[in-house]
Each structure stands twice: as structure tokens, then as C-alpha cells.
Image: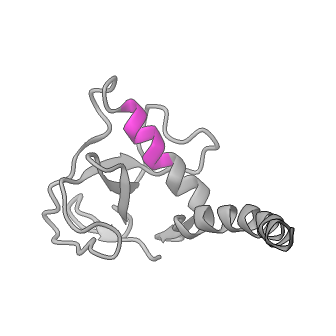
């Protein structure tokens, strides 16, 4: 009887732990002076994965000519880029703006964020995490 009560007492603790894991996976970024919440960043990666089979423009391969180190979030590539925008729906076509999420298309994992803002010759600079 006491064992059952102890087991039942753990159920609320388990229910509380699940949302914490979800929050730990989110990353907010600032590209230039534009802040993106972890929800917006996650939406961009999810949209990229969904659009991969149906789009000819984005997502596309990111070759990392600038030599960014994405090892905090991804151990290796390949890398793809997708526009990071403030819209509540995320990027849906048209002008992509200056900001991008970088992700691994094999794992769907966020790797980093980059921007054209402040870069020369259409290159990229890193966003702040």
C-alpha cells in the first residue's frame, strides 16, 4: 500500500518535468538589432524541413564559406539555410530578408543563425545567442 502511494506521489513530478525539457531545446537569437524568440527560431527550422521537398528557393545548401563554428549546436553538417523572419507564420516566400537559420537537414537540428546585416559583399556575420 505504501509503495503504491509513493508511486502515485511521483506522477505530478513527472508531469511537471516534461515542459522543462521542451524549453531547454529553444534558442533565441539577435541578428543585427532584430531579436527572434526561440519560438520564431524553431518555427523557421520546422518550416524549412516542411518546405524542403516542395520549394526550389529555400531551404538550400549553406556552404559555410565564412567558416562559422556551429559546434555548440551541431557536431557536423551538412548545413542548409532558411530565412528567419518576424512573421507569425515564418517565411512563406518573397524577399527572404537578411537573416537565416542554419540547420542540419539530416537531423532537423538547429545549428546557428547568421545575417547579412553588417556584412560586406553579400557575406554573412553571426547572430548573437
Question: Would you identify the image quadrant in which residue 36 lies?
Answer: bottom right
Depth check, front residue: 65 or 28? 28
**Which region is colored magenta?**
44-51
- Residue drawn at x 57%, y 53% is 40
Q: Is residue 121 magenta?
A: no
- Residue drawn at x 38%, y 39% is 49
- Residue drawn at x 13%, y 63% is 65
Q: Position of residue 70 (x, y in %)?
A: 27, 71
| Horizontal side of residue 76 vs 31, given as left or right | left
Depth check, front residue: 58 or 110? 110
Q: Position of residue 11 (x, y in %)?
A: 78, 63
Is the N terminus in the top left, top right, bottom left or bottom right quadrant?
A: bottom right
- Residue drawn at x 29%, y 32% is 57
- Furthest-front residue in view? 1
Q: Is residue 103 above or below residue 14?
A: above
Q: Is residue 63 above or below residue 118?
A: above
Amino acid at each position: 500500500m505504501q509503495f503504491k502511494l509513493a508511486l502515485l506521489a511521483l506522477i505530478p513530478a513527472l508531469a511537471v518535468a516534461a515542459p522543462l525539457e521542451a524549453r531547454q531545446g529553444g534558442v533565441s537569437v539577435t541578428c543585427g538589432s532584430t531579436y527572434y524568440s526561440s519560438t520564431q527560431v524553431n518555427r523557421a527550422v520546422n518550416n524549412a524541413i516542411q518546405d524542403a521537398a516542395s520549394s526550389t528557393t529555400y531551404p538550400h545548401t549553406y556552404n559555410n564559406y565564412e567558416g562559422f563554428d556551429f559546434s555548440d549546436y551541431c557536431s557536423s553538417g551538412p548545413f542548409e539555410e532558411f530565412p528567419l523572419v518576424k512573421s507569425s507564420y515564418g517565411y512563406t516566400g518573397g524577399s527572404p530578408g537578411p537573416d537565416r537559420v542554419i540547420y542540419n537537414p539530416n537531423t532537423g537540428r538547429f545549428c546557428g543563425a547568421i545575417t547579412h546585416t553588417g556584412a560586406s559583399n553579400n557575406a554573412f556575420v553571426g547572430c548573437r545567442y
